[in-house]
Amino acid sequence: MTIATELIPDQASQPAFEGQPAFEAGHPDGRAPITMLNPDFPFSYDHYLAHPAGLGQVPPELYGAEVAVVGAGLSGLVTAYELMKLGLRPVVYEAEQIGGRLRTAGFPSAPGVVADLGGMRFPVSGKAFYHYVDLLGLETKAFPNPLAPATSSTVIELAGEKHFAETPADLPAFFHEVADAWKAAVNDGAKFSEMQEAIRARDTARIKELWNGLLPLLDEQTFYGFIAASEAFKQAGFAHREAFGQVGFGTGGWDTDFPNSILEILRVVYTDADDQHRLIEGGAQRLPEALWNHAPSGMAYWPDGTSLASLHSGSPRGAVDRIARAENGDLLVRERWGRETAFPAVVTTCQSWLLSTRIHTEESLFPAELWTAIERSHYMQSSKTFVMVDRPFWKDIDPATGREKMSMTLTDRLNRATYLLDNGPDKPAVILLSYTWNDDALKWLALDAHERVDLMLHSLKQIYPDVDIASHIVGQPITVSWEADPNFMGAFKANLPGHYRYQQRLFSHFKQDELPESQRGIFLAGDDVSFTAGWAEGAITTGLNAVWGVVNHLGGSSAPGNPGPGELLDELGPISLD
Ligand SMILES: Cc1cc2nc3c(=O)[nH]c(=O)nc-3n(C[C@H](O)[C@H](O)[C@H](O)COP(=O)(O)OP(=O)(O)OC[C@H]3O[C@@H](n4cnc5c(N)ncnc54)[C@H](O)[C@@H]3O)c2cc1C
């Protein structure tokens, strides 16, 4: 997402949690933490995962039965990992590389120096995400967001005027007014504080009451329409709305999200998904890779030492190009190079557009209204450009100002946001020169990496005329435009106004009791099926939904005392607006 960390100013004092286990972080004041308990379906996936009875069982005669999982991103690998633990044999297909949008690129001349091209900062409120991070023993540290405690300083450049800040308090009153207007807008128009209290308390009845009341009022409202209509922003004036879009209140601009449904933004801010971010040491791709290689103990059927990697002899199968129904009711999955295998169940985790554009998916496998939802999904574009530099030179003190030479930078210029990623004093460092969305990302699309870097350095020169960034660059730049990659076709889903119904269909499809037999057994999971696309938490939780769906479809059940998402969907799930 376009990030505005520390959305509400009084959260700015929260500690960085350096060195603390990430899973426990999030409640410095002793109150229960905010979690990504999504208001559309406030099911506690973290409790479900932690339950000693596990996620369920399949009939023993099905031990070893194969289930296809399309995509080796985070969602596919969580799905496959949990199916393996239950005794099934997941068969993972992958068009490109393990990790999907958790892709980490290395700078070849400096082993260990990396750039996260997709997901890179993970909110501590994502409890299911950190369940796997902790299980797999991955190290994390605070991400250097604008004005975050882990960031020594931030420069905000707006309409040619520069503001230097070490903490939010250093910014001029104008930015505090913008923050106050936003706080008032979400409280007045979307019951922000009440919702956060209910989320802290895991009071699912209250969460549903609040959200179900807001849905019909806000589904057809854009983010921009919401702030423009709010009394607080009306009174503050256009300059405040404009600055909010360009740089937030010093924490990151939101304007590329302005055309999206306000519901998408509320889901993020209610659940603190935009706050207290951590990165994975060594790169985000280490998480899916660790899932692939990990051998859990005490599995229902497979002996200790079995991992997804060992079940696949080291590599997933290739790209899928067709999914169809066999005469006997099985699902047939064909690979790009012709091999076809029959399965009793299939989980697809790739962006759902790919089911019509890259995979010949038999139309009769899904109801027509689900196809509408798939086709109408709206994806954000996103571009990132990284360079490696010889050292974190920005930490040198400028004798003229007594400040570090360069800061994390937000600007209304082309670059929009520049992040400084330090690997330690004696190591090459990385600068994410520009991280952009939608129209801003499209401006880079036709340019190659060198053209992008030239323009980005030009912009930064206007902000830091005395800093020679280029003289520190070593190696080749790394750039990505997710919309240009045929295996993704976009960064991630962001619903437009009026799309709630589509999302409800996509999300709820894993519970198939009302579908005809001919449409059962194929499950959608992954980022764009979730209500919080753009956050890895949703990739995981929709994968867990699909696991429940497969187990149920094959005649299995949830563990006693640990009801699964399918059991609670009717009670807690997304309501119909019709
Ligand atoms: C630019 C960007 C920034 C992000 N920032 C953050 C962040 O900071 N924090 C956060 O929590 N989340 C972030 N996300 C979201 C996060 O990366 C995703 O939620 C998560 O990685 C999605 O996982 P997935 O398994 O659902 O999908 P994917 O990772 O897309 O996995 C699907 C897999 O399917 C494969 N595939 C495609 N077609 C086929 C085929 N025909 N056959 C077989 N395989 C196929 C793909 O190659 C891919 O590996 C970001 C994403 C992007 C793009």
Image (tube, grey):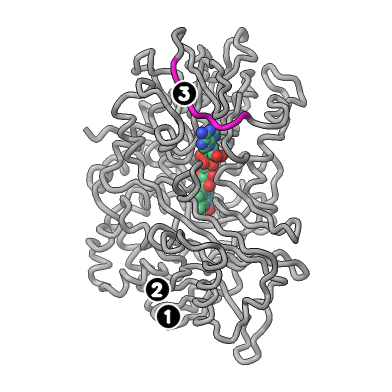
Q: Secondary structure at mark 1?
A: loop
Q: In the rendered structure, which segment of residues is drawn in magenta?
A: 317-325
Q: Position of residue 285 (x, y in %)?
A: 64, 46
Q: Residue farthest to the bottom?
A: 400
Q: Depth check: 206 or 167 in front?
A: 167
> Which residue position is annotated with label 3?
323
Q: Which residue is mark 2?
A: 176
**Magenta stretch: dominant secondary structure:** strand
Q: Is residue 324 magenta?
A: yes
Q: Look at the image and tell me whether residue 32 can be seen.
A: no
- Based on the picture, tell me whether residue 342 belongs to the magenta stretch: no
Ligand 1 is within 8 Å of the C-beta of the residue at disc 2: no
Q: Mark 1 sits on what residue?
A: 172
The residue at the point 67 percent across, 49 percent down is 21
Give, as a three-letter code, the residue at label 3.
Ile
Q: Mark 3 or mark 2: which is in front?
A: 3
Quarter where residue 339 is shown: top right
Give the x, y percent position of residue 484: 47, 50
- Looking at marks 3 and 2 on the same chain, the residue that comes earlier in the sequence is marked by 2
Question: Which amino acid lies under the numbered mark 1 shown in the image of this protein?
Answer: Pro
In this picture, is 358 found above or below 178? above
Residue 259, how many percent across, how many down?
30, 55
CB under 8 Å between callouts 1 and 2? Answer: yes
**Element assignment for label 2:** helix
Packing grade of label 1 (10 A; few <14, some 14-19, many >=20) is few
Cα–Cα span, label 1 and label 2: 7 Å
Give the CA distance from mark 3 to mark 2. 53 Å
- Mark 3, secondary structure of its residue: strand
Residue at horizontal 55 percent and vertical 26 percent from the top: 335
Which numbered marker is on residue 225? Answer: none
Q: CA distance from mark 1 to mark 3?
A: 57 Å
Residue 404 x/y as whole percent: 63, 80
